[in-house]
Image (cartoon, rainbow, N blue to C red):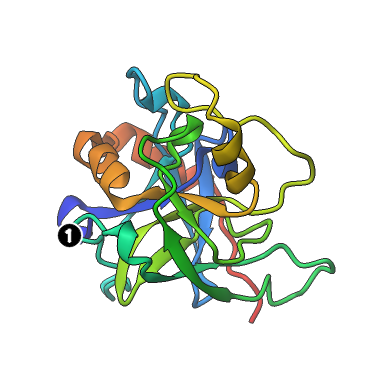
Amino acid sequence: MGSDIGGYWIVTNRHVVQQQQQLCVVGADKKAIAGLVLPARKGKFSKDLDLALVFLPCTSKEPFKLAPLASQPVNTRLLPIVHSTGYPTPLKTNPDGPPYSENEGLLLPLLKNPLEGGFDLAYTSGVQKGMSGGGVFIGGELIGINGTHANPLWPGQWRDQDGKAVNEQLNNKLELVSLGISAAAIKVELNAAVVPSAERLNSLYLLKCNPVSP
């Protein structure tokens, strides 16, 4: 959603922003802008949804580059090619920031129901630590965001959104793929989102976001 609401919505993971209420968003042009994190929406599943909305007030006359959300659900049975994007955490500090990464893979029809965290996309693209919240694309359309990477450090037990453990076969497959949150789930949160009040937006003036060195 764009500047017609006085700003822009940025979508990322809840585990990325954690408990922060304000943060600095750094764009591809290395400019840093203060944004407000909306609290988790109350609901049966939304409080456990690993998705957060950040409102970025429109302070520039130049339009942002926006990725259009997919208008229709994706047919995963066709095994479409997807690209997962993001900025992997580098092993060494880089003054220019982490490098951008874009990895190709297949979208798989593994999930009939969302998992805990709201993960409802499974794909073979390599997602590394630091790429959480990065876009997952088919062509030029955003079909979701990364949530967690493949090959975790230790095996675990995946559960669905009702807290029920998935069967062993599915659990083993989930250990080998990357997981994300779909555009459909994002749209639900965007439709329920309320633009922060002027009082909350004014609090951003206290947050100093310095531009990143080129």
At 56% from the left and 54% from the top, the residue drawn is 178
Going 49% across and 77% down the picture, which residue do you hit?
29
Q: Quadrant of residue 145?
A: bottom left
Q: Quadrant of the C terminus?
A: bottom right
Location of residue 168 (image quadrant): top right
- Tag 1 residue: 71
Category of crowding for the residue at label 1, using alpha-carbon neighbours closer than 10 angstroms: few (below 14), some (14–19), many (at least 20) = few
Q: Position of residue 3 (x, y in %)?
A: 21, 60
Left or right of 27, for residue 55: left
The residue nearer to you, when weighing 189 against 65, is 189
Where 84 sits versus 157, above or below? below
- Quarter of the picture holding the N terminus: bottom left
Q: Which residue ends up furthest to the bottom in the rendered image?
A: 214
Q: Nearer the viewer, residue 88 or 75?
A: 75
Q: Residue at x 26, y 72 (%)?
A: 61
Q: Is residue 66 visible?
A: no
x, y percent for residue 75:
26, 59
Residue at horizontal 30%, vertical 52%?
Answer: 183
Residue 13, compared with residue 196, is above or below; it is: below
- Kind of residue at disc 1: Ser
Q: Is residue 146 left or right of residue 10?
A: right
